[in-house]
Amino acid sequence: MAGKSKAAGTGDGLRRLVIVESASKIDKIAGYLGPGYRVEASAGHIRDLPQPSQLPEEVKKGSFGKFAVDVDHGFEPYYVVDADKKRTVAELKRALKDSDELILATDRDREGEAIAWHLVQALEPRVPYRRMVFGEITREAIQQAVREMRDIDDRLVDAQETRRILDRLYGYELSPVLWRKVRAGLSAGRVQSVATRLCVERERERMAFRAAGYADVTGQFSPQGESAFGARLVALDGRRVATGRDFDDSGQLKPTAVRDGVAHLDLPAAEALARSLDGAAFAVRSVEEKPYSRRPAAPFITSSLQQEASRKLRLNARATMRTAQSLYERGYITYMRTDSIQLSAQAVNAARSQARELYGPEYVPDSPRVYASKSKNAQEAHEAIRPAGEVFRTPAQVSGELRGDEFRLYDLIWKRTVASQMHDARGTTATVRLGAASADGRDAEFSASGTIITFRGFLAAYEEGRDETREGADADSTDRRLPQVRVGQPLSARDLAADGHVTSPPPRYTEATLVKTLEEKGIGRPSTFASIISTIVDRGYVRYKGSALVPTWLAFAVTRLLEEHFPTLVDYDFTASMENDLDAISRGEAERVDWLTRFYFGADGPAGGAPAPAAGGSGDGSAGPAVPAMEGIKGLADDLGKIDAREISTVPIGEGIVLRVGRYGPYLEGPDPETGELLKASVPEDVAPDEMTVETARELLTTQSDGDRVLGQDPTTGRTVVARTGRYGPYVTELLEEDAPAPAEAAEGAPKKRTAKKAAKAKPRTSSLFKDMSVETVTLEQALQLLSLPRVVGTDPESGEEITAQNGRYGPYLKKGTDSRSLASEDQLLTITLPEALGIYAQPKTRRGQVAKPPLKELGPDPESGQPMVVKDGRFGPYVTDGTTNATLRKDDDPETITPERGAELLAEKRAKGPAPKKAAARKTAAKTAPAKKTAAKKTAAKKAAAKASAAAVD
């Protein structure tokens, strides 16, 4: 089926087929449309460029064979219906036969416009078709969209298609270079490679960073009869005292600090000063007050929503967009892929009205706030992300419908939207300077500042989060109240103490700060930020360390290759200009074929003399080259002789030690300080690049190059057991005889083949050491216990299933069939008994790190099953269960007051309905060998579809 569908009765006699992207939208949209409409879902894209290996044989031999794009004839793409969408297309065709009109209601961005166009090409409708777009799924929005239907926007389709072709050309030309010079199987991406470079450059800065130490003096000061306030030393003998901002990344004072004559205090000097100020007569030297005001942040766009959800909700970009997509499809928020901060008139009125009702009229300015959008693509970004509807539902009103991340994200969006139409926060900022002469005659001046919020304004609803800075949050003095003092007023001092500091390296990117940087540099677009981060993580270029993004050594090798041999392709300005040019194409200000010609073949074109297109450039519609001057990416992998693969994959560490990125991971090479012998060692995954100092490298070379630590012989097999340190940490293993055959029992259990090219070799047993073990101290007895894992604990007497104790990626656990339970410690792997394991399985299963929640209420035995009935709080709300059947409570059922009779009634109703029907598995059919053929294209409103070849691969 083409996804879940909803058909309504006819009203005017016309039957209309409406196609949306997601099946979860169907019920709501069908309900809002009324009679005469049938709603089906395409489940996203239905056609794409195939892999060249998937092309029909006769097509492979032609101009489409390399990229599935004919670069010699206008960059014509060859599309095929995705294999998993053939059934969907067939169902949509059948639905279209019974329809008088086709309405394409895919999402309102470039991707949605392209999906609509592809649907027309695949379905070949013989009835009129129109495009319907909406920014929210509410009755008013859907009905307005029906009244304002339009043709497919061919400019948006061109822009999306250009992006898709561009990424195919980039990846297919550049990836082979990485295969040959770095590691097989790697892939390069136009934007992902640049995002990886950002992370690598930041890590290089951290590797080159040298900390600087400095100190100051703090104390508590109080006027007579007043409470004390804290102040920090800022000047000594008229010279400003150095702070962290005065040092560069080499640990030296910046030239400006040296020129200004700042006083650099070390800890001993600061301690001496603190002692000499003990008993000094402090007095107020100056008091400065000035008004303070702070404006609310603009409503959310895609990037700012991802940043704020990362800061406040600890959601990554992918989870944020998945949650926002669900909220949009269920009618709670407006469309979540946008780069416009503007609000519609009805949204402004709704936000102002709610702010007035909830916080008071004094919190709402006389005239609405207007936010100017930076986006030039008005056709793609009509409105900011906000609660849906003409009247916003408060978080309290949706708390019974939304839970978990969905509720938290809605709450965040609602607060930000309402706050954006509220008054500024106002107050005063005071700075007090005070000082005294030390016992040794030096003049010490201290400073304290504080901001008093006298009117909270928008802060009553929402305050934007902040990212980590190198200076930390010490400077934040908001809502710090200082006592009223006057110039010359004496102050008593206490708790004078020296405070030592060390400068911090540049913080690594988090998802929030990487999205912010990509946006500031104009790299990527709102709909791509989440996929960019997901891609560089999934491809092994970046890994998480807490919330920080740490580049791997593989990323260092790939980035260096691109920087040294293809610098334009990872240039930030060049990548941003390509994004601007794609925007220009979407606005009709540039022509896609000319642009792609210049990008692929270079400025001179395929024949070496093609005229340069005039449109494009900065994306502002002005004349200029569509792509910065470059030779073109055609044939990047043709001549790689100048690239030294070994040099590209080498990172100098110091003292003759280098790190190399090899086929099986990073490793170290360096001379033995005593013998000069070349030593090698694997690099553990948990060692970040900035942690790879000479000392760390030397330690790894010494410990790993000492060879195996022989623990003894296994009395059962007679094999030698050794302890080692490897890429994934310390472990124990057994040494096998050369060419030892696989155990007979393993061979018997394996399927027999008619011919065996080579006898299977035995694999040594290995096991990681427990966290409290080390290579130097582990014993043979411990090693044999580790090698016995996974251990059979026993058999469940009820089910007959075997229970095993195993050590996994997320720690020790028990496994019985498909049911896994975490263990509290690694030691339990070796000691847990069958009764203890059965006791663990008798407890309710919980998610990792969570404690089982007690039932909300106990209702007694169920009359039908005889099992105890309890009310529990589940992921989708409270429900009643007897341990076998679960029934969700209705809206009118209160978990605290529900009666046993009502609980039994709900369970009986659920049993009567029976289990939810399972989706029928798609029937597999033998693949047809008939070649796909290009279909003759039809003209759309303003576009000749003949420019795009399609594959009629739909049964």
Image: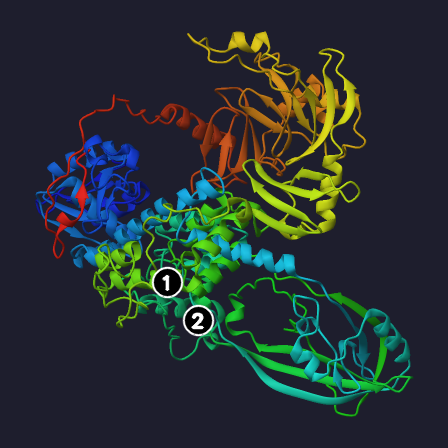
Who's the residue at 43% across and 9% down the image?
A: 755
Q: Position of residue 836 (x, y in %)?
A: 70, 21
Who's the residue at 50% across and 21% down the image?
A: 863
Which quadrant of the rendered structure holds the C terminus?
A: top left
Q: Amino acid at mark 1?
A: Asp
Q: Position of residue 356 (x, y in %)?
A: 44, 71
Q: Nearer the viewer, mark 2 or mark 1?
A: 1
Mark 1 burial class by Cα count in 10 Å: few <14, some 14-19, many 20+: many
The answer to whether 730 is drawn above or below residue 866 in the figure is: below
Q: Which residue is mark 2?
A: 356
Which quadrant of the rendered structure holds the N terminus?
A: top left
Direction from residue 81 to residue 522 in the image, left or right? right
| SS type, badge 1 | loop
| SS type, badge 2 | helix
Direction from residue 409 to residue 931 in the image, left or right? left
Mark 2 burial class by Cα count in 10 Å: few <14, some 14-19, many 20+: some
Direction from residue 616 to residue 243 in the image, left or right? right
Q: Which residue is mark 1?
A: 339
Q: CA distance from mark 2 to mark 1?
A: 28 Å
